[in-house]
Structure formats: C-alpha cells, structure tokens
Amino acid sequence: MSSTGTQLATQSSAQVKTKLCAVLVEDNRLDAELILHELRRDGFDVSAQVVQDEAGFTKALLTHRPEVVLADYNLPNWKGMETLDVLRREGLDIPMILVSGALGDVTAVECIKRGATDYVLKDGLARLPEAIRHALREKHERSLRHQVEENLARKVDELARSNADLEQFAYVASHDLQEPLRMVTAYTQLLAERYRGKLDENADKFIGYASEGAQRMQVLIQDLLAFSRVGRNGSVRVSVDCNVVMKDVLLALAPAIRESDAVVTHPQLPSVWADRTQVTQVFQNLIGNALKFRGKEPPKVSVQAEGAGDRWLFSVSDNGIGIAPEYRETIFVVFQRLHARNEYPGNGIGLAICKKIVERHGGKIWVESQAGSGSTFKFTLPDRSAADEETENRKDAEKVMVKA
Ligand code: ADP
C-alpha cells in the first residue's frame, strides 16, 4: 500500500470509534491517563474505572462490567496477577492484559502461563490497542466455540435420553405384552384341542391360523425382549480369551456343524476387554448365520483377528449365499431379513443384537459381501489394554471423590 493509502486507512479506522469498557488496576494516575490517551488516540471510545486493590476491583466488576482488565504488575496494596483469581472466583471470562514496567521475559512467560492474556510494556503503549483487539477477538471465538460445544453436548444428551426412553419402551412393551399373549396362545390351543374336527373345515383352518400367529408373535416378542435386554442389567467387562469363547460357540453349534458338514477354522485368537456372555453371543450369531445361509457346498467358515491400534478387528468369513450390496445396512436393523422363513428360518434379530453389543463396546460392525460369493462380517472390540485405561480412569475418579 502507498503511504497515502496507509494514512487514509489509519484515518478512517480512527473515525469509527469502538466502544470499550475497561477496568484499570493502576495506582499511578499519570500512567492511567497515558493508557487511556493511547486507547482513545487509536479509536477506542473508552469508559474506564481505575482501581488499586481487590475490594475496588471486585466492586468495579459488578458495577462497570468490563470487557477487558488492564492491570499493573505491582501495586502498593495488591498484585495485578491476583485479578485473575478474582475473575476465576466470579466465573468471569474477561481478558486480562498486564500493562507494566519491564518484568523480564521469564516473569512475563510465567504470567501468560498463569492466565494473563497478554503483556504490554508501559513504554511501548502503542501496542496496547492491537493487544486489546486481539484479546477481544480471541474471547469472541472462545465463546462461539463454547456455544457450539454446549449445543453438541445438549444434542448428545437428548439423543442418549431418547435412546434410553426408546429402550425402556421396547422393554416394557415386549415384557407386558407377554402376559396377554400367553392367554391368547393358551386359549387358541385349547380351542384347537377341544374342537378340532367338531366344527366345519374352515373353523379348523382359522383356529390353526390364530394359534400359529399367536405362537409367532410370542417368538417375536421374546426376540425383542432379548434385544432390549442387551446391557440392561449392566455389563461386566473382563479380559475374555476368544479361544475359550470359540470353544463354547463350537460346542453350542455342534449339531448344526455336523448336520451341514461344515468346517470352522480359526488361528490362535487374542483376548479382548469385554462382557463374556455378549462376546460369545456375537460369535455365535455370526457363525450360526454362516452355517444357516450356506450355498450348495458344505460351509467353510474362517474366523480371523488382526490388531488395529487399541482394538482388535475380527472377521467371520463364509462361502455362503452372500448379500447384495444394497442390503449391507438393512440386515443390521431389528426384524429385517432378506428371505422367507420357509427358505431360511429366523426372525431377523441376530445381527441387530450383534450391532448393539459391538457398539456398546465402542466398536463397529459391518459386512463385506457380494450376492452369491460368500460374506465376511467384520467387527472391532477393545484390546485387553483398555482394562488399564479403565483402571486409571477409576483411580482418577476415586481421587476426585476423595478430594471432594
Ligand atoms: P436371521 O438370521 O434370523 O434372519 P439376522 O439378523 O441374523 O437374522 O440376519 C438378518 C439377515 O441378514 C438374514 O435374514 C440374511 O438375509 C442376512 N444374513 C445374515 N448373515 C448372513 C450370511 N452369513 N450370509 C448371507 N446372508 C446373511
């Protein structure tokens, strides 16, 4: 910019007065006047209160409501840095700039570390206006950030609450529906036993439909209850050896493995920090599905694990019927399935339970597959080292509680 341009810019910024409310902690009247003069010269329309001690400062905060505090380092009856204690005590986020004689670099850095926003020398007051503008800009950005964080925290809170409400609703609904449904099932069965062949052919059919429907509903409600029960009574995280889990799962699935002539393989697996029952359920649901949704060949199922930072990435691969890409998300939704029940039995709750369990452990679950060419389900679980972190957090929390 040319020198004329600079001059014009200075003039026009000087014409637009910026209102500024300040408290000066200063015992030297002349210094206070010099500071105010410098600010006015630079375009601030300053309204200031000058105080010399803690009582005066506390009062000025209330009556004057400053946007900035300009404090001398040393006063006869007080110390400028102690304004920070008062501001903290009052819960006020007001920038405090030290305006002082030479302090030395070490002291100046120490003051900034302790919370002073900036440090301006009395014989370099020309820098003060820019220091104030910078401090006010920073404070504005800080409060915007704070607002965004608060909004986010509120949204997370609302979401958690609405999730909890929803879970509570699913639990109560499924739990309370069981009783009347038991009545319907019992009486339709009684009808079937007593009156089969005694009424006309249609009546037999209708009773059959009714009792089939009631039984089906009972299974669905039990599944829904199982889903909403995941983690309801709290989960106990321990170190879980996945080799032991696999042993249990293979034992539970032995009839299906034998019947389908399946081969299930896995290398030495790691230990995870998780709820043992829930992890067993995940492996059992996924391997059970790999056996159920088989193709023409006998099932070949492979379980693998690889390290992924502080977690383990597990995969369960099969050579079954596969899943078309457009269904990769929907299969994890409660009661969503891709086949008629007479083709493949099931209710569509297994993967929803897997997802809930994995996510409650802070992990993710997804599928990689193409229709007709097998599926690989992948999921992550925390490594055993999460235990140390949890212990540390607990210790910290205990320390805080002891202090309180
Ligand atoms: P269910 O097995 O009772 O149907 P799931 O929630 O376990 O319920 O699975 C949902 C759907 O995802 C299944 O109906 C099936 O269409 C699909 N699916 C799950 N696992 C596999 C797999 N290994 N191979 C192919 N399709 C699968």
Image (cartoon, rainbow, N blue to C red):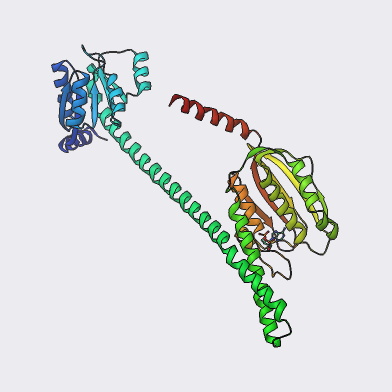
In the image, taking residue 68 as reference, residue 402 lies left or right, namely right
Q: Quadrant of the C terminus?
A: top left
Q: Residue at x 61, y 45 (%)?
A: 363
Residue that sits furthest to the bottom in the current view: 200
Q: Position of residue 124 (x, y in %)?
A: 24, 19
Relative image position of residue 58 (x, y in whole percent):
22, 25
Residue at the spot 76% in from the left edge and 48% down from the top edge:
303
**Viewer-nearest residue: 375 or 243:** 243
Give above or below for 389 relative to 207.
above
Q: Quadrant of ligand 1?
A: bottom right
Where, quadrant-wise, is the N terminus in this rendering?
A: top left
Residue 202 shows up from this direction: yes
Count the numbered circles shown.
0
Tell which residue pokes out farthest to the front in this image: 194
Does 293 appear above or below 263? below
Q: Is any part of residue 364 visible from this angle?
A: no
Above or below, comparing residue 126 to residue 313 in the picture: above
Residue at 68% in and 46% down = 277
Q: Who is closer to the viewer here, 314 or 204?
A: 204
Picture quarter containing residue 266? Answer: top right
Residue 246 placement: quadrant? top right
Question: 321 or 120: which is nearer to us?
Answer: 321
User: Residue 343 in the image: x percent, y percent?
Assistant: 74, 69
Q: Residue 126 location in percent, x, y?
A: 22, 23
